[in-house]
Image (spheres, grey):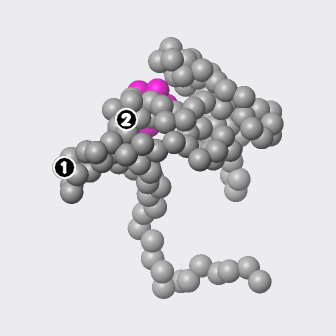
Amino acid sequence: MEGKWPTEMKVAQIRVARPTDQLKKIENFYCEGLGLKKIGSFEGHEGYDGIMIGLPNSNYHLEFTQHKDGTPCPAPTKDNLLVFYIPDSKTIEEITKRLKDMGYDPVSPENPYWEQSGVTIEDPDGWRIVLMNSPGIGN
């Protein structure tokens, strides 16, 4: 039986959070390279600094935190992905070029499905993003 979202459970926002030990490089990759917007930040919160990055006008975003002691955080596998469904191939080409100019070349995905219509690139921590030329599911 498929679960049903409880009607009384109101969710205002979704945040995907992960640590890094190179916060500035992550900010440059996702904001300057990928073109996402920095929507918030904090410093010195019990030893943590952080940034929130998202798509404009969205109720979901990414948070990256860095502890003052520099906790390393390797990516778990080559198949842990953050997929951006982008219907315009020209936009994907522009982002790919911008990231390549910053030193981030495309990599071969572990799952060949992502190579059919997408470009896979590793962020500074080795986590992979996919720029998928597709309108996405449900669109």
Q: What residue span does the magenta drawing correspond to?
A: 32-37
Asked which secondary structure carries label 2, the reply is loop
Mark 1–mark 2 Cα distance, whole angstroms, equals 16 Å
The residue pinned by badge 2 equals 22
Q: Residue at x 51, y 42 (%)?
A: 74
The residue pinned by badge 1 equals 44
Q: Residue at x 60, y 20 (%)?
A: 105
Q: Residue at x 45, y 71 (%)?
A: 11
Quarter of the figure with residue 79: top right
Compared across the picture, whether 11 is left or right of 110 comes to left
Q: Amino acid at mark 2?
A: Gln
Asked which secondary structure carries label 1, the reply is strand
- Looking at the figure, which quarter contains the N terminus? bottom right
Compared across the picture, whether 122 is left or right of 8 comes to right
Figure check: 92 above or below 9: above
Residue 96 is situated, as x and y percent measured from the top left of the image, at 58, 23
Residue 98 is situated, as x and y percent measured from the top left of the image, at 51, 19
Compared across the picture, whether 43 is left or right of 84 comes to left
Q: Amino acid at mark 1?
A: Gly
Can residue 90 be seen by looking at this rendering?
no
Other-residue count near label 1 (Cα within 10 Å), few / some / many at <14 / 14–19 / ≥20: few
